[in-house]
Image: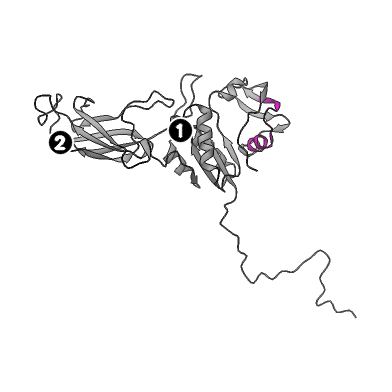
């Protein structure tokens, strides 16, 4: 009679699992890199005392000391005294920006200095700001880390860094967008559709044209091993040029159904620059078909 004690049926294999199976963690899996426009700044409020002969440093670096027309549009700092009255820049106070530490504007330290009258600089300002008075300084800033590649595994970290994705309520104007930060929205959608980590890179308006902004952003991740799947965001322009509008729901691109961000990313990465396909979208519940052409973009090899 045959001995079946050591018999192994065909196709069945026995493996010793007494030792733990170790999965290398040096290369994170399922990472999506998203490049595009962010809100462009973060906001902060400092409570400081001001003096006419002593510069007082604000806590953040890369502060916008004047308004920026944009995009994105950034408001000038607002300084209020303890009574809530708004002080006037150039009359009650001024800012001193120190870039001596290197790193340009994004690494600059900003100081606030109280102003007096022309005849008595140590006296109160024209609107009654005295030496040692407490003021509340609300400002926007974008330090050197803001435009650097940053990895996120928690959606809340993304909105804390770049701003909320959407407004709390829908705008009354049907042509207005509810999107506050396109980068936050895209990154959170990627995570909602299976990405374990998002490597986000905010484009910097200071780099010039949209093309220059993307080239500068790509250069920052060129040697980053994590940047394997890259999704560039073209907001208010690229899609509209092809006949699509904000609010359209893309359901098919060429021969591919689009049901998730992963579907879209697959099609974008499989496409060839100059390739022309038909995009099918839903607008106000009705199907719309337009011809679109894929643009030249960065691809990983």
Density class for disc 2 (Cα within 10 Å; few <14, some 14-19, many ≥20) is few
> Closer to the camera, 150 or 259?
150
Residue 269 falls within the magenta-colored stretch? yes
173 horizontally vs 110: left or right: right
Tag of residue 204:
1
Q: Which residue: 9% across, 27% down? A: 120
The numbered disc on residue 53 is: 2
Vertical side of 193 occupied by 286: above or below:
above
> Residue 211: horizontal and vertical position, in percent?
53, 29
Q: CA distance from mark 2 to mark 1?
A: 35 Å
Among numbered discs 2 and 1, the one appearing first in the sequence: 2
At label 1, counting other C-alpha atoms closer than 10 Å, the crowd grade (few under 14, some 14-19, many 20 or more) is many
Relative to residue 227, is residue 46 drawn left or right?
A: left
Q: Is residue 290 depicted above or below 14 in this figure?
A: above
Q: Of 43 and 274, which appears nearest the observer?
A: 274
Q: Report the magenta residues as a range.
A: 264-280
Q: Which mark is residue 7?
A: none
Residue 103: image quadrant is: top left
């Amino acid at each position: 009679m045959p001995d079946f004690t050591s018999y192994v049926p065909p196709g069945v294999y026995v493996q010793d699992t007494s030792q733990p199976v170790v999965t290398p963690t040096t290369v994170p899996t399922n990472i999506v890199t998203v490049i595009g426009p962010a809100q462009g700044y973060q906001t902060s409020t400092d409570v400081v005392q001001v003096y006419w002969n002593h510069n007082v440093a604000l806590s953040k670096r890369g502060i916008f000391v004047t308004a920026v027309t944009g995009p994105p549009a950034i408001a000038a700092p607002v300084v209020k005294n303890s009574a809530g009255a708004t002080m006037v820049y150039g009359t009650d106070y001024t800012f001193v920006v120190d870039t001596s530490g290197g790193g340009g504007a994004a690494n600059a330290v900003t100081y606030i200095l109280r102003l007096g009258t022309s005849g008595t600089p140590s006296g109160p300002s024209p609107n009654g700001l005295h030496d040692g008075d407490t003021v509340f300084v609300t400002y926007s800033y974008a330090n050197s880390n803001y435009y650097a590649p940053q990895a996120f595994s928690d959606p809340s970290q993304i909105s804390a860094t770049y701003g909320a994705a959407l407004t709390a309520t829908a705008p009354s104007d049907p042509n207005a967008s509810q999107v506050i930060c396109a980068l936050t929205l895209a990154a959170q959608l990627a995570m909602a559709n299976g990405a374990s980590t998002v490597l986000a890179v905010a484009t910097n308006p200071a780099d010039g044209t949209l093309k220059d902004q993307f080239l500068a952003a790509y250069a920052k991740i060129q040697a980053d091993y994590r940047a394997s799947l890259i999704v560039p965001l073209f907001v208010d322009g690229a899609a509209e040029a092809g006949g699509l509008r904000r609010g359209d729901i893309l359901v098919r691109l060429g021969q591919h159904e689009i049901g998730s961000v992963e579907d879209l990313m697959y099609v974008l990465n499989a496409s060839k620059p100059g390739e022309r396909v038909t995009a099918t979208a839903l607008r106000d519940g009705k199907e719309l078909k337009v011809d679109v052409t894929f643009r030249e973009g960065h691809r990983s090899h």
